[in-house]
Amino acid sequence: MSVEGEIRRFRKDLKRAQATSPGDVAKRLPAFECQRCAKCCRGAFGDNTVTVFPGEIRAIMAATGRSWGEVAEPEEDGDVDRYGNRHAFEWALRKKPDGDCIFLEGGRCAIYDVRPWICRTYPFYLDESRVGHGECDGLCKDRSRDGPGRGEGPEALAKELIARRVRELEESIALLERLDMEAGRGRSGLIVVHDSEGTRLVAGKRRGRT
């Protein structure tokens, strides 16, 4: 499918997401009670990669005083172009040498008030109108009045899931509208990161841990 075709498809998906009923989503959410175990933040318990949008990175920067590169790095996956540059289409929060999130401190999130959408809605996500979820010790428990650890119930979580889905689609549309696969031409060994704000050229290196 062409880029224009992808944009049209995402716009249709966006309209559907915006029309999604929180009540309908809430009814489909499995019982869940956050155990506050922080396993989702630790590298020892599986893939804890947290992809982030530019706006989320800026919010974390403002809250922590860290630079963009100290907060996030290009995701690992991506194609290599004819110039030898790797193209990435997502940013991810950096990790410690042991694989834990850099913002996990004393078993708690140090950026809780500005944590990314993925963290706010974990372990759930919306795929169109379907509710999916990752692995989590909090699943299949009696549903708590506190919901996902925020003092909110299933419908509040459903609203956040819909808002996350809307944001993901808006970001995807903006990325495609600004996509420039020729960025970095004439140079080599770069990571060319495409996001909703445009294109960034990052010095190429193997994804590291900080």
Image (cartoon, helix red, strand yellow):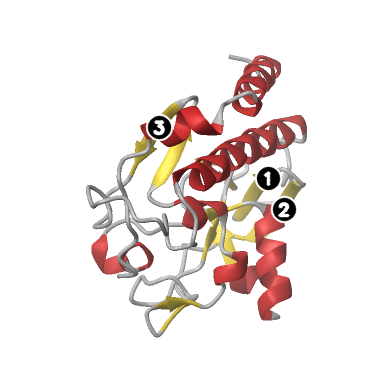
Disc 3: which residue: 27
* Residue 37, percent from left and from top: 30, 70
Q: CA distance from mark 3 to mark 1?
A: 34 Å
Q: Are marks 2 and 1 in contact (CB under 8 Å)?
A: yes
Image quarter of residue 28: top left
Residue at horizontal 38%, vertical 72%? 100
User: What is the crowding at mark 2: few (fewer than 14 residues within 10 Å), some, or many (at least 20)?
Assistant: some
Q: Along the line of sight, which residue is nearer the eye, 91 or 30?
A: 30
User: What is the crowding at mark 3: few (fewer than 14 residues within 10 Å), some, or many (at least 20)?
Assistant: few
Q: Secondary structure at mark 2?
A: strand
Disc 2: which residue: 200
Q: Is residue 110 above or below residue 50?
A: below
Q: Secondary structure at mark 1?
A: strand
Residue at horizontal 69%, vertical 16%? 8
Query: Which amino acid, by three-letter code, is at mark 3?
Result: Lys
Sequence-wise, the earlier of marks 2 and 3 is 3
Whether residue 4 sits left or right of residue 125 in the image: it is: right
Q: CA distance from mark 2 to mark 3?
A: 41 Å
Disc 1: which residue: 195
Q: Residue furthest front?
A: 145
Taking the image as drawn, is residue 66 in sight? no
Sequence-wise, the earlier of marks 2 and 1 is 1
Whether residue 130 sits left or right of residue 1 in the image: it is: left
Query: Which amino acid, by three-letter code, is at mark 1?
Result: Asp
Q: Are marks 3 and 1 in contact (CB under 8 Å)?
A: no
Q: Secondary structure at mark 3?
A: helix
Nearer to us of marks 3 and 1 is 3
Label annotation for residue 37: none
Q: CA distance from mark 2 to mark 1?
A: 8 Å
Image quarter of residue 196: top right
